[in-house]
Image (cartoon, rainbow, N blue to C red):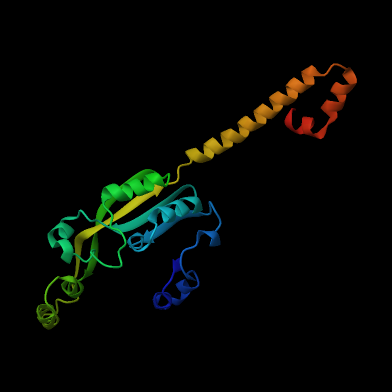
Amino acid sequence: GVEPSLSAIEAAPKYRQEWVLHGVFDSQVFEKNSFDLVCCFMTLEHIFDPLEIAKESYNLLNFGGAVAFVVHDSNAWINKILGRKSPIIDIEHLQIFSKKSITQLLKNSNFDEITVHSFKNRYKLSYWVKLLPLPSIVKSTMLKILVATRLSEIKISINVGNLVAYGIKSKLFLKIMINQEELTNILERKDQLAKFLDIKTKKEKLDLLDSKMMRNNFW
């Protein structure tokens, strides 16, 4: 994978660190049509051109490969309730998605079999309390109570308004490319046959049949 934060790479298990490139995503580093799966989690909100990333992901995938994007859902119930106090309203977020917009992004990048749905995040109760839009003194008191009652480590799954979007690079495009190549070969053979029929003398026909191009493409 690719990770711009060195501290995040160092936090990963040692055996995984060698799999991660330190830097920003650059599709030129990788070979086209070489991946079966491309993942991008909670990142599209932070970049200037999500469409460019989606299209570059498409180019990196094998035919039949899949992309998986995880983004915030601006239309989720919790974000509607919190409004401007929602954590997704952040100066670092250059855009915010919905089911409709992330679906359109994948369509505009030529993906097929697009699926978008919400999911639950699972964290410790203490972490959820820290995210609440409450005064610091209130959250601090709640956290102390959780620690005292040994409830802070309990993990809870909550749908907090995130989406996962899948798209497939259709194998149909590969079939079309193959068919185009076959059609080109057929047309070349047709042109050669027409040329062969137009030749008047037997010697010229024999010379043409003996040529490398005629042997390879016509017969």
Q: Which picture quadrant has residue 144?
A: bottom left
Apparent side of residue 43 relative to residue 157 in the rendered image (left or right)? right
Depth check, front residue: 15 or 70: 70
Residue at 90 percent across and 21 percent down: it is: 203
Depth check, front residue: 211 or 89: 89
Apparent side of residue 62 relative to residue 181 in the rendered image (left or right)? left
Q: Position of residue 121 (x, y in %)?
A: 24, 63
From what the image shows, is residue 47 above or below residue 210? below
Depth check, front residue: 212 or 25: 25
Depth check, front residue: 48 or 108: 48
Q: How many marks?
A: 0
Residue at 35 percent across and 59 percent down: it is: 44
Residue at 88 percent across and 18 percent down: it is: 202
Q: Residue furthest top?
A: 200
Q: Position of residue 22 (x, y in %)?
A: 48, 72
* Quadrant holding the C terminus: top right
Apparent side of residue 50 relative to residue 34 in the rendered image (left or right)? left
From what the image shows, is residue 88 above or below residue 215? below
Q: Residue furthest right?
A: 203
Residue at 83 percent across and 27 percent down: it is: 208
Q: Which picture quadrant has residue 205?
A: top right
Apparent side of residue 140 relative to residue 48 in the rendered image (left or right)? left
Q: Position of residue 19 (x, y in %)?
A: 49, 69
Q: Position of residue 17 (x, y in %)?
A: 46, 73
From what the image shows, is residue 169 above or below residue 19? above
